[in-house]
């Protein structure tokens, strides 16, 4: 009968050893209680080299092993062996690390800190914005002080018809984006716009890969205005200020300027209103733009159809109606106070639209 001698197997142990790149390789040790010098020798280093041997602890920390110090191997043991005679302190998400090399890459910081792929890694800097680190970026640790790194949930920004979304997943469906931006998905035809390219139609089920370079915005066009108006060909019978038109193009799908009975109107179609108004999610907004704008102020605003609160309460100073485009628009008499008087050098369509939004939200206590 053959007997297998297991005594030698029990005495040996496998460890994993890596250099500064943290790429571990397996090495067989002759016994389970090696010294730091024996580990570095097994890793292929000469005894006369200035070496640092670090044991990687379960919590991600390190323990420095002296050449004559004995370690008890328990299985799955990992060591870093590097030619170095000093260490450089850094922190990763508040945890202290003593690293034996004067530089470190983003990839190594991520490995040392066990930072998952769905988080971004930042290098903390003084007096300037913290730096987003990629794996190949290298940080010098030789300066004075302790260098700090931190991680946070990755964020991708998507513009949905002027609404800025911060998304924590790299992909999102068109439907999900519209719901997050408080649009009713079925009310809109949706187009995806890339920088320097024509917008392309997308379905509600389309998945947008937010890591794709050049995504500009989701552009929405109402499928059916649905409030009694008929939108004719968009008119631009007079120009606004350049910054006004840029803002309107960015924020709204359909707007126009025209002159009617000697009065100049800016009209924004399918403006979404806050919850709290009965029967309407979208209205047409009209602003009267004086001929000598911006020296003269834009005052009040007009909506069609008329808005009513779901509570049944009345809305002050909205009793008057104005005929615009053959429709009866509800006039909202909202005026600037003395402390917020119109300033020709800083006020414009953009600031007046902020007043409109504030007024609509105020009535529904938002």
Image (spheres, rainbow, N blue to C red):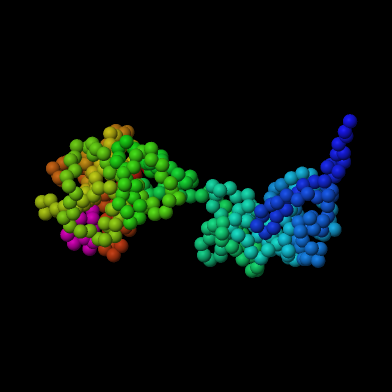
Please state, as top left, top right, bottom left or bottom right, where the N terminus lies in the image: top right
Looking at the image, which is closer to me, 170 or 245? 170
Vertical placement of residue 143 versus 75, above or below: below
Residue lying farthest to the bottom in this orientation: 143
> Main SS of the magenta segment?
loop
* The furthest residue to the top: 1
Q: Write down the region rendered in magenta.
A: 288-299
Q: Position of residue 311 (x, y in %)?
A: 32, 33
Q: Residue at x 77, y 61 (%)?
A: 45
> Which quadrant of the figure has residue 179?
top left
Q: Looking at the picture, does residue 27 appear above or below residue 129? A: above
Residue 342 visible at all:
no
Relative image position of residue 272 (x, y in whole percent): 30, 42
Q: Quadrant of the C terminus?
A: top left
167, 284: nearer the viewer: 167
**Residue 271 in the image, given as x and y percentages of width and height:** 28, 44
């Amino acid at each position: 009968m053959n007997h297998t001698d297991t005594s030698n197997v029990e005495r040996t142990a496998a460890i994993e050893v890596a250099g500064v790149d943290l790429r571990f390789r397996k090495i067989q040790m002759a016994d389970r209680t090696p010294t730091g010098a024996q580990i570095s020798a097994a890793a292929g280093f000469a005894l006369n080299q200035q070496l640092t041997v670090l044991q990687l602890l379960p919590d991600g920390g390190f323990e420095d092993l002296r050449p004559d110090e004995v370690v008890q191997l328990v299985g799955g043991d990992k060591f870093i062996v590097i030619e170095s005679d000093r260490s450089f302190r850094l922190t990763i998400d508040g945890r202290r690390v003593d690293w034996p090399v004067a530089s470190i890459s983003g990839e190594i910081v991520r490995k040392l800190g066990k930072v998952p792929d769905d988080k971004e890694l930042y290098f903390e800097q003084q007096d300037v914005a913290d730096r987003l680190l990629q794996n190949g970026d290298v940080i010098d640790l030789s300066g004075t002080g302790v260098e700090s790194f931190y991680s946070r949930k990755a964020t991708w920004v998507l513009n949905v018809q002027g609404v800025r979304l911060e998304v924590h997943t790299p992909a999102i469906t068109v439907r999900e984006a519209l719901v997050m931006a408080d649009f009713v998905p079925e009310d809109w035809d949706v187009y995806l716009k890339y920088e320097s390219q024509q917008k392309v139609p997308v379905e509600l089920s389309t998945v947008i890969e937010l890591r794709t370079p050049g995504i500009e915005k989701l552009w929405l066009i109402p499928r059916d205005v649905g409030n009694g108006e008929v939108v004719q060909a968009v008119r631009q019978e007079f120009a606004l200020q350049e910054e006004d038109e840029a803002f309107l193009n960015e924020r709204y799908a359909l707007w126009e300027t025209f002159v009617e009975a000697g009065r100049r109107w800016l009209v924004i179609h399918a403006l979404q209103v806050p919850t709290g108004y009965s029967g309407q999610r979208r209205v047409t907004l009209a602003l009267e733009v004086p001929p000598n704008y911006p020296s003269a102020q834009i005052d009040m605003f007009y909506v069609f159809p008329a808005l009513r609160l779901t509570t049944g309460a009345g809305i002050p100073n909205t009793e008057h109606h104005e005929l615009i485009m053959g429709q009866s628009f509800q006039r909202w008499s909202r005026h600037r106070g003395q402390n917020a008087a119109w300033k020709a050098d800083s006020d414009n369509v953009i600031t007046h639209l902020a007043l409109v939004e504030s007024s609509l939200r105020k009535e529904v206590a938002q």
